[in-house]
Image: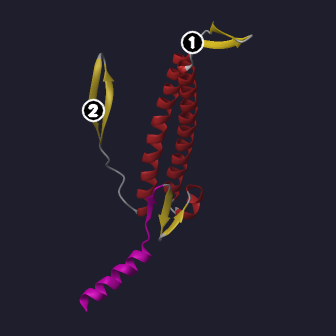
Amino acid sequence: MNKILLLVALICFQSIFSQVSLDKNKLVKDGVKYKFSKYEEVFENQEALASFKKARTNNTVGSVFAFAGGFTAGFGIAQVLQGKDKKVIVNGQSQTVKVEKAKGGGALIGIGVGLIGIGIPFAIAAKKNTDKAIALENGESTAFQPYFKLESAGNGMALSYNF
């Protein structure tokens, strides 16, 4: 009998103190899934709202850089793979015509990879702000979060512990 009462009490408390969680690309509150665009219906805490809004902005900027970088790198790869010689049939005879390879394919690949590299920190910041917003909404502590960071130190690299 005590176990049944304990179970009923836990179910009641769970429904009273609903929590927000993340399931793939959806916010989940009380078992209902919401799209990221409906975050204002999910979050009640103003600080959590501001943090999630910042996360959405970072995600959008990161996605734009990633898309532009992917397109540019793909276009550069296509130029690099383009053939040098081209056979042309003129008056029934096959002739080989030298075609200059389009220059700048390697540069486009480099620019594309650079744009993708610019988008990565925005994606990481979006993940951190999303986690922070969910923690704030659920009433979890966000004060002490130590982390490791890889930095350049003069002529080499350094691993720092930040708290």
- Residue to which mark 1 is pinned: 84
Q: Is residue 131 above or below residue 1?
A: above
Q: Is residue 93 toward the left or the right of residue 138 in the image?
A: right
Residue at 56%, 44% in the rendered image: 57
Give the spatial CA distance, label 2 vs label 1: 50 Å
- Asked if the stretch drawn in magenta spans residue 130, the answer is no
Nearer to the camera, 157 or 136: 157
Horizontal and vertical percent position of residue 132: 42, 52
Residue type at tag 1: Lys
Residue at the disc numbered 2: 160
Q: Is residue 89 above or below residue 59?
A: above
Q: Position of residue 85 (x, y in %)?
A: 58, 11
Mainly helix, strand or loop, the magenta region? helix
Q: Secondary structure at mark 2?
A: strand
Q: Residue furthest right?
A: 91
State the image quarter where residue 8 is shown: bottom left
What secondary structure is marked by label 1?
loop
> Where does residue 50 sit, x and y in percent of width and height?
53, 51
Residue situated in front as seen by the camera: 44 or 91: 91
- Identify residue type, mark 2: Ser
Using a 10 Å C-alpha cutoff, classify the residue at mark 1 as few (fewer than 14 neighbours), some (14 to 19) or many (20 or more).
few
Look at the image and give the residue range highlighted in magenta: 1-24
Q: Quadrant of the N terminus?
A: bottom left
Nearer the observer, disc 2 or disc 1? Answer: 1
Q: Residue at x 44, y 47 (%)?
A: 127
Q: Within 10 angstroms of label 2, few (less than 14), some, or many (20 or more) residues? A: few
